[in-house]
Image: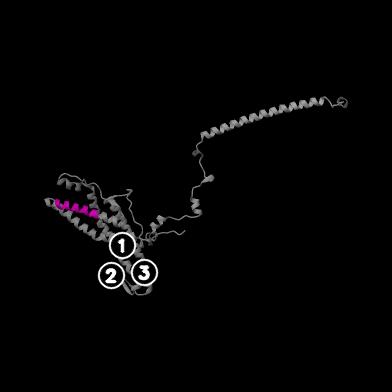
């Protein structure tokens, strides 16, 4: 039977056809501008808010920064659900009813979700730095994959000690070698992309919300875009003929039934006992009949003996 295995499940090269890989790549592409934006805005807000805290303006800046951090954390939670495959609900740690403006402001300051969101936004900057690694590898590997269509040309890999790092590809063997190098670079870049996305997914699960469903923190990663996994799981392996019969539970006389599972039938036992007693009575009656027959035989034997003792009948007596 042929196994309907999804191409995305193949080792090493499965990332090329896995739709999740490209969603992760999009997440890293968005992480670069968002990381720098969060770093500038919130660093500015907290620094100037603390410096101006001696006057009322500083507290307003700090409060606006915290509220902006909550809004940004909500956007990051939505982004993680769409691109990283998480299923998160926002923390329910902010009281709904408060009395007065001061209490309304304090509930956001006291909420742990506010500071968790701030922590995630600070870590987002390091994600931005890590996102450059697979993106640079892709930028270097993709042109090499197209080398047979472009040669002769010079591949540029940046600078080292002020000098450019280049590779002049002038012949077909060099172009084929460039394709091999480019494919390896692309595969490494995509695997690193999934690794960085996994780290971001764990950060989002820990800091941005509560996982729904079974609550185990697992993510609801969707299957590959070709839908072969869902078709296989829905249809399942087909069984016909002897294989289906072999999987069926044993029935009839061949089925094994534990002795403990059988409960004795008291009525049947009593009926069997009555039948045994009746059979015993019948045996006794048969024994009596045999004895009576034996007595009759003895009486017949005595009569025969008496008749033999009288002797034969003579002719004179007959006359």
Q: Is residue 70 magenta?
A: yes
Q: Is residue 204 magenta?
A: no
Q: Earlier in the sequence, mark 3 or mark 1?
A: 1
Residue under label 3: 179
Is disc 1 surrounded by few (<14), some (14 to 19) or many (20+) residues within 10 Å? many
Residue under label 2: 164
Do the numbered discs 2 and 1 sit on residues whose CB atoms are within 8 Å? no
Q: Tag 3, which secondary structure? A: helix
Do the numbered discs 3 and 1 sit on residues whose CB atoms are within 8 Å? no
Q: Nearer the viewer, residue 224 or 108?
A: 224
Q: How is the image coloured?
A: one colour
The answer to whether 24 is drawn above or below residue 162 in the figure is above
Residue under label 1: 134
Q: Position of residue 159 (x, y in %)?
A: 27, 68
Report the Cα–Cα distance between label 3 and label 1: 18 Å
Q: Nearer the viewer, residue 77 or 252?
A: 252
Q: Main secondary structure of the magenta part?
A: helix
Report the Cα–Cα distance between label 3 and label 2: 21 Å
Q: Earlier in the sequence, mark 3 or mark 2?
A: 2
Stretch in magenta: 59-75
């Amino acid at each position: 039977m042929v196994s309907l295995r999804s191409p995305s499940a193949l080792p090493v090269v499965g990332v090329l056809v896995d739709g999740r890989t490209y969603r992760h790549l999009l997440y890293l592409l968005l992480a670069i501008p968002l990381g720098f934006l969060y770093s500038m805005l919130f660093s500015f807000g907290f620094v100037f808010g603390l410096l101006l805290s001696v006057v009322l303006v500083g507290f307003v800046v700090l409060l606006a920064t915290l509220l902006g951090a909550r809004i940004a954390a909500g956007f990051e939670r939505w982004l993680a659900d769409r691109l990283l495959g998480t299923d998160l609900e926002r923390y329910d740690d902010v009281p709904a009813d408060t009395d007065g403006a001061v209490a309304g402001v304090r509930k956001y300051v006291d909420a742990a979700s506010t500071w968790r969101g701030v922590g995630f936004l600070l870590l987002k900057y390091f994600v931005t730095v890590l996102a450059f690694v697979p993106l640079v590898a892709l930028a270097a590997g993709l042109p090499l994959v197209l080398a047979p269509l472009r040669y002769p040309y010079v591949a540029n890999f940046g600078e080292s000690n002020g000098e450019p790092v280049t590779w002049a590809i002038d012949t077909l063997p060099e172009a084929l070698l460039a394709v091999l190098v480019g494919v390896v670079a692309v595969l490494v870049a995509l695997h690193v992309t999934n690794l960085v996305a996994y780290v971001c997914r764990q950060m989002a699960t820990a800091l941005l919300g509560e996982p729904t469903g079974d609550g185990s923190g697992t993510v609801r990663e969707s299957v590959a875009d070709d839908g072969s996994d869902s078709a296989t799981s829905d249809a399942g392996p087909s069984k016909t003929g002897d294989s289906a019969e072999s999987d069926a539970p044993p029935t009839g006389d061949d089925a094994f039934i534990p002795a403990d599972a059988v409960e004795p039938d008291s009525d049947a036992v009593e009926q069997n006992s009555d039948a045994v007693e009746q059979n015993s009575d019948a045996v006794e009656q048969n024994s009596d009949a045999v004895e009576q027959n034996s007595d009759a035989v003895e009486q017949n034997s005595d009569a025969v003996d008496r008749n033999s003792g009288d002797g034969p009948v003579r002719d004179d007596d007959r006359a």
